[in-house]
Image (spheres, helix red, strand yellow):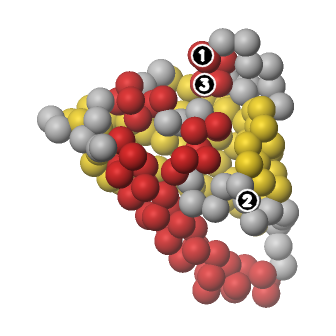
Amino acid sequence: MSIEIKAPPEKVWEMLAFDKHLEWMDGYKSVEYTSKVRTPEDKYKVGASAHIVEHVKYDLEITESLENKKMTYRFNVRRISMIMTYVLEPVDEGTKFTYTVDYEMHWSILDKVIEKLYLRRHIEKETEKSLEKLKSILEK
């Protein structure tokens, strides 16, 4: 899923820190860093991690970080392994922000049917709301 935001990649990048997710990620209730954060830059480094409370609790870890260009997180929620990737591309009016979620389920066949009927649509709906919120914040 992609959205164009009228803000430079540097401003969008600032919003990718875990603690900034509280401002725009739909459903986030709390974020607590579990890695050492001595400088603001530490929040964006590979290996930075945080404990997230949403409708479930889980830990996120940055696995790839290319400043102002790309960030990838890894986490597990219940029996699902997920990888989220944010890609920032400069465009004439600001930044094209692309958000992808890849996941692998460790579920039964019945659970996989539920995933096709519910989970995928839920992720898309929540992602769309979050991206619109991010756009609104950055374009003020």
The location of residue 121, given as percent across then percent down, is 54, 76
Residue placed at 64% from the left, 37% from the top? 19
Pointers 1 and 3 in contact (C-beta within 8 Å): yes
Residue 13: image quadrant is top left
SS for dot 2: loop
The answer, for residue 80, to whether it is visible in the render is: no
- On residue 44, which mark appears? 3
Q: Secondary structure at mark 3?
A: helix
- Seen in the image, is 90 located left or right of residue 123? left
Query: Residue 135: horizontal and vertical position, in percent?
Result: 35, 49
Give the numbered dot on residue 54: 2
Amino acid type, callout 3: Tyr
Mark number displayed over residue 41: 1
Real-space CA distance between mark 1 and mark 2, rounded to the nearest whole angstrom: 25 Å
Q: Residue at x 24, y 41 (%)?
A: 6
The amino acid type found where label 1 is placed reads Glu
Image marks 3 and 2: residues in contact by CB distance under 8 Å = no
Vertical placement of 74 versus 17: above or below?
Answer: below
Is there a contact, CB below 8 Å, between mark 1 and mark 2?
no
Image coordinates for residue 27, horizontal then vertical, percent = 64, 62
Percent across and percent down for residue 137 are: 39, 46
Name the one closer to the observer, 97 or 43.
43
Q: Name which quarter of the figure residue 44 lies in.
A: top right
